Amino acid sequence: MKEEINHNHQLLISLLKDIVTTKKGEGLSALDEAVESAINLILAQTNIGGKLMLIGNGGSSAIASHMATDFWKNAGVRATAFNDSVSLTCIGNDNGYKHVFEKPLEMFGEEKDVLIAISSSGMSENILRAIDVAQKKKIRIITLSGFGENNPLRTKGEINFYVPSMQYGHVEVIHHAICHMFIDVIIAKNLKANRKVEAL
């Protein structure tokens, strides 16, 4: 068992180093640059009255929910996740599950918003349909994906984070870590700004 534990541990460490980040129109970029760009995008849009929206299925839905709460509660960023059970079951029943994120984005998405789309496979139809709506509404997009390197979600965002692994658990852990990085840096930035104000 220790061998399997150590192997898993080493895989996670290597995956953190192997995250592939791309920025639209620029191709590959360093992780720190992509994270900084994502944070700057989120803050720029929410500072002009936009909101951050997060979507995902299954484990990615749990990440979306957790992170949306942390964004508004801890980082002071207006954020929401479209995964309320009533909405999901209503839209899924009436329109089909492939529309569960597309419909809320059509109703609530605005041009100044940012969408974080999380999908381990990068192939979920409901996520890709939501991306189509976001693009039409000129909503800014950040994607987090994994599995196959040619997954369609990987190139859909202004900033894209890809985890080169075929294991759900590993992809989800890294996606969660990336989102926490966004939040933790924003919190640190806010604390620094508050200290400067207090020092005046």
Image (tube, helix red, strand yellow):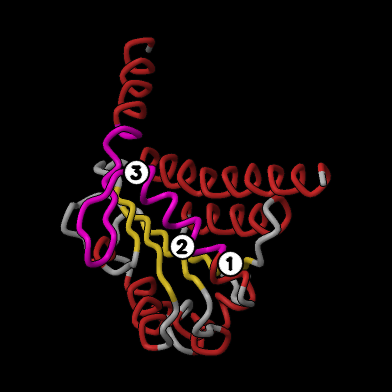
Direction from residue 167 to residue 92 in the image, left or right: right
The x, y position of residue 57, in whole percent, is 45, 62
Quadrant where the N terminus lies?
top left
How crowded pointer 1 is (Cα within 10 Å; few <14, some 14-19, many 20+) is rated as many
Q: Nearer the viewer, residue 152 or 123?
A: 152
Distance, label 3 to label 2, CA atoms, is 22 Å
Looking at the rendered image, the disc whose residue lies closer to the viewer, 1 or 3, is 3
The residue beneath circle 2 is 56
**Which stretch appears magenta?**
15-43
Nearer to me, 171 or 188: 188
Residue tagged by mark 1? 81
Q: Amino acid at mark 1?
A: Ala
Residue beneath the point at 54% across and 58% down:
64
The disc labelled 2 sits on which kind of residue?
A: Gly
Image position of 98 with respect to 181: above or below? below
Residue 188 forms part of the magenta stretch: no
Upstream in the sequence, badge 2 or badge 1? 2
